[in-house]
Image (spheres, rainbow, N blue to C red):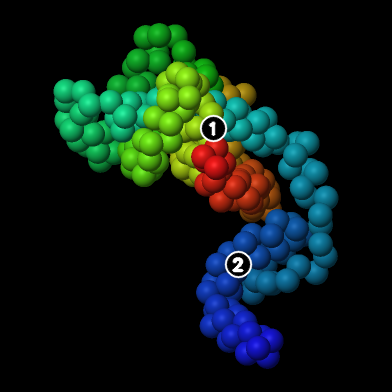
Amino acid sequence: MRRSKRKQTLIAWLVLSPVVFVILFPFVVTLLTAIKPRNELTAIPPHFLPSQFHWENFLTVWSETNISHALLNSLYISTLATLIAILVGAPAAYAMTRFDFRGRRAYRFFLLVTQMLSPIVLVLGLFRLMVTAGVVDSLSFLAVIYAAFNVAFCVWMLQSYFETIPKDLEESAWIEGAGRVRSLLTIFLPLAVPAITIVAMFTFVNSWNEFIIAFSTLRDSSSYTIQLGIIEMTGYYSIRWDYVMISVILASLPVAILFSWLQKHLIGGLTTGAVK
């Protein structure tokens, strides 16, 4: 039995090896470029492996550029946008699945239509709105904009999951004397943790990767996001590719850490709060 299992594992790895190579190859090139000596970045013919590993490049980029501040700005904007989207989207999705009100189908159709609009279509209007309100370079207002673009996605995804949660669980709690708010907090939301976690992950990533709106509405370099911080390193006459690659690695780490941390909680919330 063990031999057959080992054989299946070996075959699976042999089949998946090309896929793993294709996925990891860009990250390997990025890392090797980040730690190369400067004179080897534009060498002809190019050197795949550096002659020396300059790990101090990471400290140089962190201390001599604006990338650390841009990283913190992106963390603040993405986290705030995720919280706002969840706080607005979760109650709306709950209302769509638990209350029968007039215009519910029209509202669902409206949410679907809004997902077809590209943010670039609204950039000019958003910029004029920010200028009129005097909130240009405001990170908090930019987070509100990101949340607004993700609320429809949150509601659409959450209401599909909420419909799978039996109403009997809440009704049992009502029979026992719990009100709607208490049953919502102790019964419904714990069962909805997996869906909320997934939606939060996608909202955070969407806010983290957004470029067009940030590029159009942020003017001061102190309010740049991580994407604008990377663009700032690409000059007209020369590009420090080692700095750019290090910034790309730093921009990828928070998202990778978020996924590796939250995936442990996805299955754990499936049975939490269920009636014994």
Q: Secondary structure at mark 1?
A: helix
Comparing 119 with 96, the one in front is 96
Q: Could you tell me residue 57's position as x and y percent?
A: 78, 50
User: Residue 123 bears which disc, if any?
Assistant: none
> Based on the displayed image, in which of its 4 quarters is residue 232 positioned?
top right
Side of 150 relative to 83 (left or right)? left
Which residue is disc 2 drawn over?
A: 24
Of 19 and 104, nearer the camera is: 104
Kindly identify the amino acid type of the residue bearing the numbered disc 1: Ser
Above or below, 188 against 38 in this view is above
Left or right of residue 40, residue 227 in this image:
left
Between 102 and 78, the residue placed more toward the observer is 102
Q: Position of residue 271 (x, y in %)?
A: 54, 46
- Residue closer to the observer: 223 or 108: 108
Q: Is residue 49 left or right of residue 183?
A: right
Residue located 16% across and 23% down the image = 102
- Name the quarter where the C terminus is drawn: top right
Label 1: which residue? Answer: 78
Instruction: Identify the amino acid type marked 2.
Output: Leu
Measured as percent of width and height from the top left, residue 95 is found at 33, 26
- Disc 2 residue crowd, few under 14, some 14–19, many 20+, Cα 10 Å: few
Q: Could you tell me which residue is drawn at 21 percent across and 23 percent down?
A: 101
Give the residue displayed 43% in from the left and 25% down from the top.
175
- Relative to 173, 40 lies left or right: right
Q: Are marks 2 and 1 in contact (CB under 8 Å)?
A: no
Q: Earlier in the sequence, mark 2 or mark 1?
A: 2
